Amino acid sequence: MKPEAFTVPSSIALVSSATRNGDVYTIHVHMHRLAAWAASTAARSSPSCRFDVETGTRIIELGIVDLLTGALSWPEPCKMNEFHHSLRHSVIAAAAACGLSFTHGIAAKLINMYFKVVLITAENCMHPLIAALHPPIDGDMLQAIVRAKVGDQRLWRRLRDVGWTKFSSRDYEEAIAGLRSLLGPDTPLWMAEEYWGGYQGAWKKRPVR
């Protein structure tokens, strides 16, 4: 039988179903667990906001998965920023219900890492919605952009000095606008991770901000 064509909403719906039927280990349970672990590990790297993977997974299920299969619909790619704003507020509220205080920077890291792992593949990387997904932003990326002397350096130096874990909604939205300006209008935003060197262990050489 021919597999169904990829769509972002249907992929999230399958993940949502998997979280409710965890007694059956399907590929979607597999994807969700991996993505939740990766997102929680990345978002909890700030010394000011520590939590375990179980709590991070609960926040993802309350603040992202449940919302996307209920009240919030996937947007047109051009509306991704507004959509992301709503998601961040949902994740911040879910974190508060778990006794945690998330900034917009930490909420964004959890969202963006989760989507990166659970949604992006070589086959769908140019899909309009995938291309519009926000990339994870951290101190390593901000420092690399400053070192490369590209884009609006006044902006990037300011954001680096603020630190991603302390980003307000405005800081975060300025960072995404800066990445879009840096890449151009037609380049998928995931390509901003050209400036992320964490896979090389560079993050170990600097404190998380």
Image (tube, helix red, strand yellow):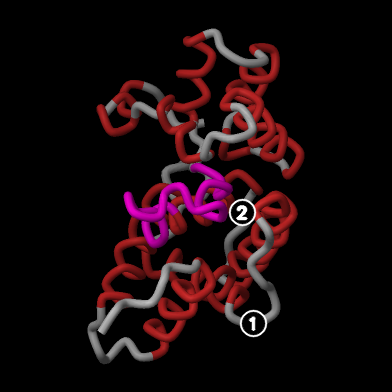
Q: Position of residue 163 (x, y in %)?
A: 58, 30
Above-or-below relation of 157 to 167:
above
Is 178 displayed left or right of 149 in the figure?
A: right
* Quarter holding residue 97: bottom right
Q: How far apart are the two marked residues, 2 and 1, measured between alpha carbons?
A: 23 Å
Q: Residue at x 41, y 71 (%)?
A: 5
Instruction: Spot the residue most to the front.
Output: 2
Q: Residue at x 40, y 27 (%)?
A: 194
Is 21 displayed left or right of 63 in the figure?
A: left
Number of numbered markers: 2
Q: Position of residue 100 (x, y in %)?
A: 58, 61
Amino acid at circle 2: Phe
- Mark 2 and mark 1 lie on one chain; the one further toward the N terminus is 1
The residue at which mark 2 appears reads as 102
Tag 1: Cα neighbours inside 10 Å, few (<14), some, or many (≥20)?
few
Q: Which residues are magenta?
A: 116-135
Q: What secondary structure is found at the residue carrying circle 1?
A: loop
Above-or-below relation of 76 to 150:
below
Above-or-below relation of 189 to 144:
below
* Quarter holding residue 198: top left
The residue at which mark 1 appears reads as 70
Q: Residue at x 51, y 18 (%)?
A: 145
Q: Residue at x 44, y 50 (%)?
A: 44
Check if residue 129 falls in the magenta segment: yes
Amino acid at circle 1: Gly
Q: Nearer the viewer, residue 70 or 44?
A: 70
